[in-house]
Amino acid sequence: MPLNRRVRRADPSEAPFLTQLTIRSKAQWGYSEHFMTVATPELEFRVEKFVPDFLVYLLEVDQTRVGFCSLLRVDDNTIELHDLFIDLPHIGHGHGKRLWLFALMSRGGEASSG
């Protein structure tokens, strides 16, 4: 059965989830406990960093949030990928590639499904 995948704009109220996903994903790459403790404040997802545009997108698979990417508008012609994190159980299934491609094609507009 095909997976129901969609990229949707995150809601600012999802910031706690985004913070926890970021920390879990970052920690799995073998960083020391000390580094993770020191880095945690920097890894906290802060909504004000992405205002006014709030170009933060979640990838959902069968209504489960599996990862996200955030984009920052540099100027009228440039949007920069800021974050791209996939939750641990979902790494290795092509979800990072899907978000990467979404970010490459994005102009800060609406999300997509498929």
Image (spheres, grey):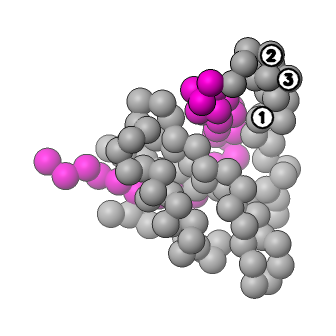
Residue type of the residue flagged with mark 3: Val
Picture layout, residue 30 above or below residue 112 = above
Image spot of residue 109 (x, y percent): 60, 74
Can the viewer see residue 74?
yes
Quadrant location of the C terminus in the rendered image: bottom left
Which of the two discs, 2 and 1, labels the residue nearer the N terminus?
2
Residue 5 vs 34, above or below: the answer is below
Q: Residue furthest bottom?
A: 77
Residue linked to disc 1: 44
- Give the label, 2 or 1, closer to the camera: 2
Q: How many residues crowd around disc 2 within 10 Å: few (fewer than 14), some, or many (20 or more)?
A: few
Q: Residue 57, relative to residue 41: is it above or below?
A: below
Q: Give residue 53's mark.
A: none
Q: Quadrant of residue 64?
A: top left
Q: Left of 37 or right of it: where is 18?
A: left
Q: Kindly state the secondary structure of the residue where label 2 is placed.
A: helix
The residue drawn where x is 79% and y is 83% is: 76
Magenta span includes 37: no
Residue closest to the eye, 35 or 101: 35
> Which of the pair 21/54 is nearer the observer?
21
Picture quadrant of residue 90: top left
Q: Are marks 2 and 3 in contact (CB under 8 Å)?
A: yes
Q: Which mark is residue 34?
A: 2
Q: Position of residue 8 (x, y in %)?
A: 51, 57
The residue carrying mark 3 is 38
